[in-house]
Structure formats: structure tokens, C-alpha cells
């Protein structure tokens, strides 16, 4: 698998020595994240497609539409599965550090909705509906080694999250608000983009 990814990277990279993004360029891609928290016996997978359109040489606007699935293992055949669909706008400001390296700051607003299901063998029971609201400001690096490909690396910096859960059949919700400040190098985001119009 690693050798196939290396070959793909080389093929995409040799198209040109560098890529110049700017007004009218479009980035199409996104990120795939996996997180396993042994302490809580939980695994999470995030698939987050993203599109960015450059309205000037240094500013892009766009957003994402994605899917998050989480599994909380309670026993060998007993677990809770939570699926959430997420979407939201994003804006980025870029500073060129070289011909193919671009530092950026991103501000994003995210919304999500979904639900949790308790699974015990072949039995499935819907347990709650969930909704999320998130706001974040994050730094990142976009590396464009070829004319049509870009890779980004992004860290969390400032984020606010509001999560609401409503048990099945209930009329009241439990709301949890969270705020974080500071980079967390243990949960970076990596993305791959295809560049149009440069």
C-alpha cells in the first residue's frame, strides 16, 4: 500500500517543478482522519471532502461536506455506533513561503447532525439523536509540488464546540459546550487536493 501511494505521489509531482495558486484557482480534495482512544476504548473515522476557491491571490473561500463515524466498544459483540453528517463554510488567508509552500490561517464554521445506535449481537436499538456546532481558527501549510496536486498539514489552535444529544423518545436535550486553545500536535489533519485553473 505504501509503495502505491509513493508511486502516485511521484507521478503527480513530476508534472511541473512547482505550482502557482492564485485568483481563479480551485482546490478539490479533503482529509481522512482516524483516531483510536485506548483509554475510552473508542475509534473514530472522519471523511471530510473540501473545496476552496481563490477569490484573490491570498484568499480562498469554500467549505466541506463530510461524514464522521465513532465506535465505543463495550464488549466483544456489544458497542455503540454514532454516525454524524457534517458541513460548513471555511475561509483561508495564505502567505507564500516559497514557490510551492504556502502558510495559511483558516476560519471554519461547522454543523452536524446524526444519531447513536446500541448494538448487542444482532439486536440494534436507536439511543439518541445528536447535533453539533463548531467554530475553529487553525494554522496550516499547503505544499504544492506539482502543477495539479497539493498536500496540506493543519493543526488545531482555537476551537469552540457545542454538542446536543436527545435520548430516543425524550423531549429534553443535554448540551455540552467546550473551548480549546493551543496547538495539539497529536491530532493534526492531513489533506490531499487537486488543483484546477492555475
Image: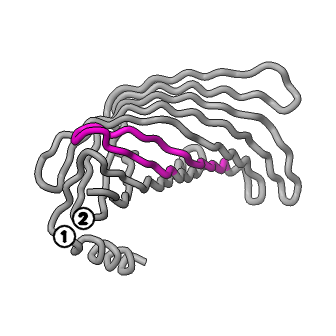
Q: Which residue is mark 2?
A: 147
Tell me if residue 174 comes above or below residue 184 in the rendering.
Answer: above
Label number found at residue 16: 1
Q: Is residue 118 left or right of residue 143?
A: right
Q: Is residue 140 left or right of residue 48?
A: left
Q: Is residue 191 left or right of residue 23?
A: right
Q: Residues within 10 Å of mark 1 (few under 14, many from 20)?
A: few
Q: Residues within 10 Å of mark 2 (few under 14, many from 20)?
A: many
Locate the C terminus and report the quarter of the image it occupies.
bottom left
Residue shown at 58%/52% (left/top)? 43
Q: Earlier in the sequence, mark 2 or mark 1?
A: 1
Residue shown at 23%/51% (left/top)? 21
Q: Secondary structure at mark 2?
A: loop
Q: Which residues are magenta?
A: 48-72
Q: Position of residue 66 (x, y in %)?
A: 56, 48
Closer to us: 180 or 121: 180
How far apart marks 2 and 1 lie (CA) works out to 5 Å
Label number found at residue 51: none
Is residue 180 within the magenta segment? no
Residue shown at 23%/39% (left/top)? 58
Q: Is residue 171 left or right of residue 79?
A: right
Magenta residues: mostly which secondary structure? Answer: strand
Q: Position of residue 107 (x, y in %)?
A: 37, 31
Locate the N terminus and report the quarter of the image it occupies.
bottom left
Residue shown at 41%/55% (left/top)? 28
Q: Position of residue 116 (x, y in %)?
A: 74, 42
Q: Secondary structure at mark 1?
A: loop
Amino acid at each position: 500500500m505504501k509503495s502505491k501511494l509513493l508511486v502516485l505521489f511521484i507521478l503527480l509531482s513530476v508534472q511541473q517543478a512547482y505550482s502557482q495558486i492564485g485568483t481563479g484557482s480551485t482546490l478539490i480534495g479533503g482529509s481522512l482522519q482516524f483516531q483510536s482512544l485506548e483509554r475510552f476504548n473508542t475509534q473514530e473515522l472522519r471523511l471530510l471532502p473540501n473545496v476552496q476557491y481563490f477569490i484573490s491571490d491570498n484568499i480562498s473561500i469554500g467549505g466541506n461536506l463530510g461524514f464522521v463515524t465513532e465506535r465505543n466498544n463495550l464488549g466483544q459483540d456489544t458497542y455503540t455506533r454514532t454516525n454524524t453528517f457534517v458541513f460548513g463554510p471555511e475561509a483561508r488567508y495564505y502567505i507564500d513561503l516559497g514557490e510551492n509552500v504556502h502558510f495559511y490561517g483558516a476560519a471554519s464554521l461547522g454543523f452536524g447532525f446524526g444519531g447513536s445506535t446500541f448494538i448487542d449481537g444482532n439486536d440494534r436499538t436507536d439511543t439518541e439523536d445528536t447535533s453539533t456546532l463548531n467554530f475553529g481558527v487553525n494554522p496550516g501549510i499547503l505544499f504544492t509540488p506539482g502543477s495539479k496536486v497539493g498536500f496540506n498539514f493543519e493543526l488545531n489552535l482555537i476551537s469552540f464546540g457545542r454538542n446536543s444529544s436527545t435520548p430516543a423518545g425524550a423531549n429534553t436535550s443535554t448540551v455540552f459546550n467546550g473551548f480549546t486553545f493551543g496547538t495539539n500536535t497529536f491530532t493534526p489533519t492531513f489533506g490531499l487536493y487537486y488543483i484546477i485553473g492555475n
